[in-house]
């Protein structure tokens, strides 16, 4: 049994150069982990 995640990441949201990335991730084990991004202000 696993878990499927759909992650949507926007950069420069609302700006002219806005980008969107969609990632589908599958976690098969309890200890599985993924880094999907970093936030910088």
Image: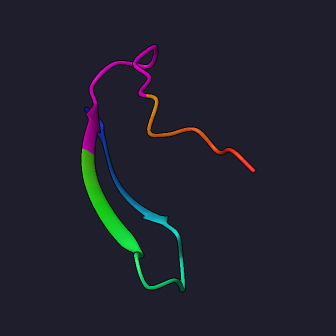
In the shown orientation, is residue 30 left or right of residue 27? right
Is 15 situated left or right of 28 in this image?
right
Count the labels in the image: 0
Q: Residue 13 placed where, x, y %?
A: 53, 76
Q: Is residue 15 magenta?
A: no
Q: Which residues are magenta?
A: 25-34
**Placement of 18 over or under 14, stated as above or below:** above
What residue is rendered at 49% in x and 40% in y? 37
Q: Nearer the viewer, residue 36 or 5?
A: 36
| Residue 27 x/y as whole percent | 32, 30
Q: Tell me, yes or no, whether the highlighted magenta stretch contains residue 30.
A: yes
Residue, x 44% and y 39% (percent of image)?
36
Which part of the image, by quadrant, shows the N terminus? top left
Provide the major secondary structure of the magenta segment.
Answer: loop
Image coordinates of residue 34 in percent, x first then y, are: 41, 27
The quarter holding residue 9 reads bottom left
Residue at the extreme right of the image, as rendered: 41
Residue 2 vertical position relative to residue 16 in the rendered view, above or below? above
């Amino acid at each position: 049994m696993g878990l499927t995640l759909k992650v949507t990441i926007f950069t420069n949201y609302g700006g002219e150069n806005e980008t969107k990335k969609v990632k589908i991730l599958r976690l098969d084990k309890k200890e599985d982990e993924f880094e999907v991004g970093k936030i910088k202000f």
